[in-house]
């Protein structure tokens, strides 16, 4: 038996090493030195999984379940209706009505929903997602101790998907607010919420990415995680291991409607700025510049003489806007706002939106191969507006290869263009590969207005091998970089 143990000891040792286990080895005595023992324990802790139990027991009472009732103004079929099953089988979307509450009873159809939230002040203020409570006729907040409160919607901000609720209570448990900027990709995070109505559900994962931009989202640099988030988690908190809220769980990427390993949270600093405005004014007031922008890639940076591909390129300026009054122009590249660097074009809408209307802002811009500063008094943002213009196509070498004709007076009037322009009739070679299309209107080359075919040829011959064309496509204006090499 002893010989058998001797033969398998090396195997057991290798197995233990692979799985991080410690086995007693004959002839060896564990060290009695406390410092050595402590170091061993510390090493084992670093390689083990964290225990979230204490964290959850600490933060759990401040996380709430939110039930929503929405009165549908028209339409709707009760489950009691004989046509209900017939329509449902054929995939017709049906707003729910409680049994017995059909049209004869005088009650309209009712839609119910569930979400999550968390208490940010002991006097009853609760943060959640705007899409959870938007258009709700009744909102109920339920605590982990089974207390329920009817909640008032103080305000919603659809741009950031943040809503502030108020319940009539005091001495409530509250969360601690963390710093999302200090969070790091790869660190552990915990979500608490009510997926599918299952209250106080805890899931964990890591931060997968930061400052993630989603389509049509210009104000939120999302935190991406792999934490399991499902319908009903919306509005719930995302905690770091210190028990601090660093985000509000808001969206998932899914092809099935369920969790697929990609979830997005609103950084808590963005949410708290919105919360203060909603609490004070009932709505969010944002500054407005009045420009359409696009990103700056390497080719555009070289075309404009920029040292690096940072900033937001102004593609067009709205007439009589704050930008127009400050003499900002198409072709200017905004590099900073009040001294804060604009790294990506998507940073600019958020930075301007964080400032209140009437604020005088200092913009660092790049124009005519020089950096300069422009002062602008911001306007007030109204309804939803297009904040950026994308650039299509790929860049390639070769000759320009396009034919164009002057813009007619009628076409110029319809498009709102003054001072000339050329309509592209056909494209090939680099112009086609750069994304130019028949029907595009050429307005400027390296910020020099295009007034006619002959003048365009002169600008083209003097431009060198790299330049940028300002193009109007429909109602949008974009810069397209061209490389002739």
Image (cartoon, grey):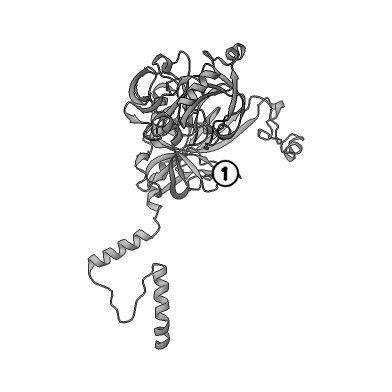
Q: Nearer the viewer, residue 98 or 307?
A: 307
Q: Is residue 125 visible?
A: no
Which quadrant is home to the N terminus?
bottom left
Residue 265 placed where, x, y %? Answer: 46, 40
Q: Quadrant of residue 281?
A: top left
Q: Residue at x 60, y 44 (%)?
A: 255
Q: Is residue 316 visible?
A: yes
Residue 66 placed where, x, y %? Answer: 50, 36
332 left or right of 30 in image: right
Q: Quadrant of residue 298?
A: top left
Q: Is residue 446 above or below residue 78?
A: above
Q: Secondary structure at mark 1?
A: loop
Query: Which residue, given by chain and number where applicable, does mark 1 sit on?
Result: 254
Q: Nearer the viewer, residue 142 or 288?
A: 288
Residue 352 placed where, x, y %? Answer: 40, 25
Residue 395 placed where, x, y %? Answer: 52, 36
Q: Residue at x 51, y 43 (%)?
A: 194
Q: Quadrant of residue 358?
A: top left
Q: Residues within 10 Å of mark 1 (few under 14, many from 20)?
A: few
482 left or right of 322 in image: right
Q: Is residue 385 above or below residue 248?
A: above
- Report the number of discs: 1
Q: Nearer the viewer, residue 20 or 185?
A: 185
Q: Is residue 307 above or below residue 406?
A: below
């Amino acid at each position: 038996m002893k010989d058998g143990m001797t033969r398998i000891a090396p195997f057991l040792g290798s197995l233990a090493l692979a799985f991080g286990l410690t086995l007693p080895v004959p002839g060896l005595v564990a060290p009695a030195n406390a410092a050595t023992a402590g170091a061993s324990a510390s090493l084992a802790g670093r390689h083990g999984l964290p225990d979230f139990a204490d964290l959850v027991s600490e933060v759990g009472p401040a996380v709430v379940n939110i039930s929503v009732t929405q009165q549908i103004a028209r339409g709707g079929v009760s489950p009691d209706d004989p046509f209900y099953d017939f329509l449902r089988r054929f995939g017709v979307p049906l707003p729910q009505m409680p049994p017995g509450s059909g049209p004869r009873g005088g009650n309209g159809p009712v839609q119910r929903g569930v979400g999550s939230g968390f208490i940010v002040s002991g006097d009853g203020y609760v943060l959640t997602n705007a899409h959870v409570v938007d258009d709700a006729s009744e909102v109920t907040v339920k605590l982990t101790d089974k207390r329920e409160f009817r909640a008032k919607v103080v305000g919603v901000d659809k741009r950031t998907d943040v809503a502030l609720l108020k319940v009539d209570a005091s001495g409530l448990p509250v969360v601690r607010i963390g710093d999302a900027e200090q969070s790091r990709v790869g660190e552990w995070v915990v979500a608490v919420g009510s997926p599918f109505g299952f209250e106080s559900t805890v899931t964990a994962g890591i931060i997968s990415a930061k400052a993630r931009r989603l389509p049509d989202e210009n104000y939120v640099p999302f935190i991406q995680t792999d934490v399991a988030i499902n319908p009903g988690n919306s509005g719930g908190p995302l905690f770091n291991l210190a028990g601090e809220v660093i985000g509000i769980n808001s969206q998932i990427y899914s092809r099935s409607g369920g969790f697929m390993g990609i979830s997005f949270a609103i950084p808590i600093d963005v949410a708290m700025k919105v919360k203060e405005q909603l609490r004070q004014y009932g709505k969010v007031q944002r500054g407005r510049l009045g420009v359409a922008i696009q990103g700056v890639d390497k080719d555009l940076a070289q075309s404009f003489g920029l040292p690096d591909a940072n900033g937001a390129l102004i593609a067009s300026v709205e007439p009589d806007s704050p930008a127009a009054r400050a003499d900002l122009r198409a072709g200017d590249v905004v590099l900073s706002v009040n001294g804060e660097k604009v790294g990506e074009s998507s940073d600019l809408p958020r930075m301007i939106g964080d400032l209140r209307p009437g604020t005088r802002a200092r913009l660092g811009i790049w124009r005519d191969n020089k950096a300069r500063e422009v002062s602008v008094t911001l306007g007030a943002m109204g309804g939803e507006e297009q904040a950026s213009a994308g650039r299509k196509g790929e860049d390639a070498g070769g000759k320009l290869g396009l034919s164009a004709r002057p813009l007619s007076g009628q076409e110029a009037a319809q498009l709102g263009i003054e001072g000339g322009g050329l309509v592209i009739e056909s494209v090939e070679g680099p112009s086609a590969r750069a994304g130019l299309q028949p029907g595009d209107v050429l307005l400027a080359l390296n910020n020099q207005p295009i007034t006619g075919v002959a003048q365009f040829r002169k600008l083209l011959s003097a431009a060198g091998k790299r330049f940028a064309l300002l193009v109007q496509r429909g109602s949008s204006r974009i810069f397209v970089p061209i490389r002739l090499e």
